[in-house]
Amino acid sequence: MFFKVLTIMVNKIRSSLSSLNIILLFSAILVLVLASSTSVLAADLVIEKTPVSDVVISDLSQPAVFSFKITNNGAEDYFTIYSLVGVKIEPTESFFISAGEIKEILVRVYPNKDLKQDTGSLVFVYKIKGENSGIQEDTLTLNVVKLSDAFTAGSASIELQSESAVVYIKNNYNIRFSKARAKFSSVFFDFSQEFSLEPFEKKEFSIPLDRAKISSLSAGQYIMKADVEIEGIKNRFESNIKFSEKSLLETEEESYGIAIRKTVISKVNKGNLETVADIVIKKNIISRLFTTFDLEPYKVERQGASVYYYWQKELKPGEIFTVRVTTGWLLPLLIVLAAVVLAFFISMYRRSHIIIRKRVGFVRAKGGEFALRVSIHLKGKSFAERIKIFDRVPAIAKLYERFGAIQPSRFDAANRRLEWNIESLDKGEERVLSYIIYSKVGIIGRFELPKATVVYEKDGKIIESQSNRAYFISEPKHKEEF
């Protein structure tokens, strides 16, 4: 309509003006038209941009997000946001803003792959176009980063007594990850977890530890690997785990046995540092003679009546050093027992005043019976008086009433006991009592006779003593007949 009116006015003036004047007038009118056109095509908007997440990951398709606050100082209109430099902007549909209205919208920005090749700040031009108000240009700034820079993974120090390890993953930027998966692996653990991360959030995970597994590890720095997967894209992050130093050496000792005494001493390195283990065993000068070791000591030291044995070994974490000690008391016990028995007999010998010995010998009988001569020998160690000697005839045998020089004073047939009486016996004086027993039943093998007993008076005291136990093995030895 405007151009139609302008044409009519030019035609009316053309007839009254020269050609030069017409040209000058037309130029002036054209300037006015252009000026009028420019004022009509430019939108009058005030735009405030607040980053919600101004970071894009070069490996992922997640957008940068901005909150736009748009104030329309011009006429009401429908507006569209777009870019011509390889950036997709949402929303793509137009939105209406009345005159003087303030509009808040959330804008998502998707740079293409070419723009995300270089990391760092990305500044680009975008446009807001009104259907009637024209076009207004502005700029946006994004931060392009790699996925490998988006996270930090790490672990807290692990103590020797720790029951669990604490690992973490931290979001380094103002961007939200709604779904991520991480696998943490090291010599201490293997652990996988799915999670989400808010901007700048640090998320921690507690992982149970295998106590048996870490008992053999030395203190120091160990590598932890964290494989993070987002939208099918994987990236590996590595960090150090500090296994804190702890020195802990425990001693275990066990002893058993009596006659053969065995002792097992063990040093166990339950820390995580290499540790020198020392074992010291003390023995006296007697027990050392009967003691053996499964390992030779590196040093033996004598201090007075004691002897010290030393062992030493450097142990790695979880390693055990064991020394086995065996002390055999059986031989010394037998020696002591023999000495006690010998002492007893010596004491008995010294306490007795009459020594009584019993002997037996084979006798050939005319009738072919089995016969033995029994002899009881008495010897005085000192003077003794009112001496009685008792002996018993075995039940299997009969007494042959033929005796030696000294006749028995009595024979108790019911109890099968012989009795002799001797008035006195001087020191060094000897007497021999003898008798014969026989049996019609042949004896095969060992034939043992009971002990003889002597009872006498010495210094007003009645003392009793017994002989040895005499025996005969049935091997005929023809010595005499009766």
Image: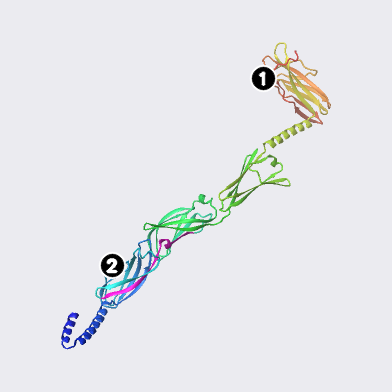
Q: Which residue is mark 1?
A: 445
Q: Say which quadrant the N terminus sits in.
A: bottom left
> In the visual, does 211 lie left or right of 7?
right
- Towards the viewer: 240 or 118: 118
- Towards the viewer: 401 or 132: 132
Say if mark 2 contacts mark 1, CB within 8 Å: no
Q: How crowded is the residue under tag 2: few (<14 C-alpha within 10 Å), some, or many (20+)?
A: few
Count of numbered badges drawn on the protein? 2
Which residue does the image show at 58% across and 47% down from the upper left?
Answer: 320
Please identify the residue farthest to the top as the structure is shown: 367
Name the quadrant containing residue 88.
bottom left
Q: Which residue is mark 2?
A: 92
Residue span colored magenta: 133-155
Q: CA distance from mark 2 to mark 1?
A: 127 Å
Three-letter amino acid code at the position of disc 2:
Thr
- SS label for mark 1: loop
- Towards the viewer: 370 or 299: 299
Up the image or down, 283 lies above or below 400; here it is below
**Sequence order check, earlier mark of 2 and 1:** 2
Please identify the residue farthest to the front as the structure is shown: 19
Up the image or down, 333 lies above or below 55; here it is above
Which mark identifies residue 428? none
> In the visual, does 102 lie left or right of 461?
left
Name the quadrant containing residue 97.
bottom left
- Residue 56 lies, in percent from the top left, at 37, 65
- Would residue 96 be counted in the magenta stretch? no
Up the image or down, 205 lies above or below 71; here it is above
- Residue 185 lies, in percent from the top left, at 46, 54
- Residue 383 lies, in percent from the top left, at 83, 28
Q: How is the image coloured?
A: rainbow
- Frontmost of labels 2 and 1 is 2
